[in-house]
Image (spheres, helix red, strand yellow):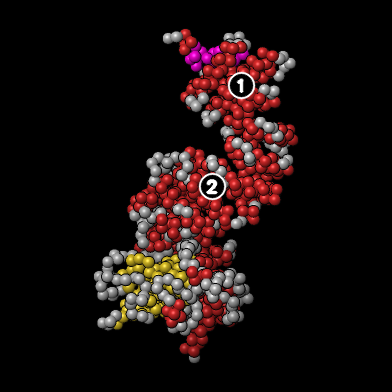
Amino acid sequence: MPVRVVESSTPSQDSGLESRTGRPPPPSCSLLSAGRAFSGTQNVSSLQKDEAWKVNVRIQGIDLDNGYLCGTMEALNVPLADTPVVTFWEGELVDGNNFTFFTRKWEATPEDDIRHWSKFPSFAPLLRWKEQYFVNVGIDCGLTIAGFYYVCFSCSDGSINGFYYDPNSSPFQKLELKCIPGGCSGYTFSSYQLL
Amino acid sequence: MPASAANNRPEDLTARLGVGAGAAQGEALLKALREVKNQIIGNKTKKLLYLHLGAVPKIVSVLAAAAASSSSDSGGISRGGDAAVIVQAAAAIGSFACGVEDGVRAVLDAGAVPHLTSILSHDDEKVVDAGARSLKMIFQSELAPKYDVLQEKNLNFILSLLDSDNENVTELAASIIAHSCETNEQQKALCDAGVLLRFVSLLGGSSNQKDGCLESIAAVIKNNPEVSSRFSCTGNGKALNALANLIQDRYPHTRLLACKCLIAVGHASPCYVEELQIKTKLVLVLVELLEEPGRVGNEAPFSLKTLIADDEELHKQALSVNAIEKLCSILQMSSVQARRLQGILLALAELCSKLEKCRCQLMSPQVLNLIVDALKHDCMDVRVAACDCIRNITRSLKNLSAGCLSSEAFIVRLVQLSHDPSTSVQSVLIKCGGVSQLVQLSKSMDSALRSRSVLALRNLMFLADITDKEFILKELTLCTLASLIYDSECSIQEQALALTSDLVDGCSQSVKHVLAEDSIILDAVMRQLQNASSIGVCIQGMFVLSNIAAGSESDKDTVMNYLVPPHTDSCIPSFTIKFLQSKDILLRVASLWCFVNLTDPASVGSSRRVARLQDAGIVLQLKSMLNDPCLDCKLRVRMILEQCMELETAQA
């Protein structure tokens, strides 16, 4: 059973445009579940060059009722680091009930929101991921987790497309991940339960 | 030594008590009684000494004789003298019963209650007061007799006390009701007799009277929706208003009791205490009362926990008035009394049950260490409360992932709990490490213990690497796992199947274990799928098969042979068709993933398996699900059918 966690990002819930409509919870998507792993790349741009870091993501917990999920992100071949860098992130599911399209925090304006969401081909499920802390390195590692990701999840094959947003970084740094099936020829599932 | 001082020794005084030869009479008896009473008031040691000397039965006999004499027709000095003796004897008896269980026992064994009751109708108000006060002391103890108000005689007696103008007497009535009222029928009888109305009218009295009435009101309405509703409607809400005013009373004990009453109303008939405003006020008052000394501070956290139980909005209110900080600061005081510590931990546990913010506030090493230390407290209730607290703190995936809860000291202390002699401690918290202890507990006769320990093992298996998986399985053994899959409780079957599913997840090397020893595990899985004792069992069972079917060619064939046995009569539909037709989305999804894996185009034997699925009517069933109302199911059905078409095309 996923853990229940409350996040108090209320402003987007109070707007007249996106007021709570009491919609039913979003459809379940079995590939968006705790334990599921994804692998791919994030294009990291700077003034000097473009790089692609290999990225592995794993979902650690999910609570659809509250539109919450969390997990870890591991960035490999990071130039400034000797080892892969792992961060813990928390996600918001844009379900129109708990969270809406408009971010209203993390220095993202409504225009930024529209610009990013419109880059995705489909509507759902859409998420925001925000890295909260470094798991295996110190904050003085020279890397930043100040921004967040706009994410689009494909229920059909579990692929993830996203854009990293940080007003102090290059825009539209793309995140592309594929779902790791788990088995040598097929999809496996695992679960845990908290009391 | 002066002669008078020597005569006041307990042994001498006791010798002068009683009736008949040898005992003192008249003024000397009165003096002895007064002296004993003065010595024992507030002095537990003296009380115990006099108990040991047998003073109580003697004093009760004095009371009985004086009461009998006083009720006769003789008047004047004799009656006055009797009254004085009664007053002193009653006061002494009350004092013996105050706060000393042995004293209560001695008083009850000596038959004091009927005599004290008889003097409640005495002409002399001082006698009535003494009797009432003494009985109140007795009725504060759990040992006191209970009055069954369903008996008319008892009800009439209590009503007569309640009608009195004497505050001590009405307080006594309230004490008796608070002590005796246990069943819904008794509550209704008291309500029908107008007791609650009378209590409301007495709420304007002295502080002691208010407190007595509030305790009784709570006892009469507790968990009784009908009585609670009637109370709430009294005088167009006058009763509730009176309670709402009393939560701001100048005395902390009164505020606490008024809160408890309102909480009782809120639980029994929620519509009357629905407004967030009043609940918020209750939270504020109770959080302030946390810092009160003595009984009020001990009981306030319990009331807070009851008030906010399962109510996320109230959790937020409590957080906003710094409930966590206050609870933690009390926790950090030296030598917190056990009852208070239990209450603090339970309140913290409740606050951490839903809100991540609360859990994070308890993550400081200082506070966490104190909570962990409470796991080895002498008092079992404290240990259980500490377990509750830690269990809820560990719901924080954020802090678990950050490794804040994996220090050796923390884990070791938790593992030691599995040796705790109290089964309620064992059952509340089994989470970490100590695989062999968990395996032992999974064989317990207590189903709750088995369930929790299998859950813990399942969680340990989640995403574990192959070495850890094999270690857990080696400790558990295939035989024990099979017996857990066959457990008499569905919930344990489900956990055992989930454990098996996690065992084979992402790890084809683990599949060999479910096939080992003549496929004892896989047979158990299949048997339970066919029994279909619960939806949860079927779901987890299908995930086991699904995970195995994600493996090698031979693993897929193994699953296939179980789902669609080769020589079965094709008229008997596979149980999987029933699962695909289930109303439960997750069961359909779990079953569909199994077929996704069995028809993987990259596997050489998939065409063969598709043909068998066709023959078994499963492909037809799948085609009928193309417009399944669940998007996830629709997507998997399309995936399977596309894979089937791809295989067909490849063959052509």
Which chain contains the residue that carries disc 1? B
For the point 40% across and 40% down, the residue is: B335
Residue B446 vs residue A170, the one in the foreground: A170
- Which residue is the site of mark 2? B303
| Disc sitting over residue B87 in the figure | 1
Q: Assign the magenta stretch its main secondary structure.
A: helix
Location of residue B4 in the rendering, given as x and y in whole percent from the top left corner = 48, 10
Where's the N terminus of chain B, which quadrant?
top left
Q: Is residue A147 left or right of residue B241?
A: left
Give the farthest residue toward the bottom: B652
For the point 38% across and 47% down, which residue is it?
B370
In the rendered structure, does residue B258 fall within the stretch colored magenta?
no
Q: Residues within 10 Å of mark 2 (few under 14, many from 20)?
A: many
- Relative to residue A110, is residue B407 drawn left or right? left
Label whose residue precedes the other's in the sequence (2 or 1): 1
The crowding category of the residue bearing disc 1, from other C-alpha atoms within 10 Å (few below 14, some 14 to 19, many at least 20), is many
Disc 2 marks a residue whose amino acid type is: Ser
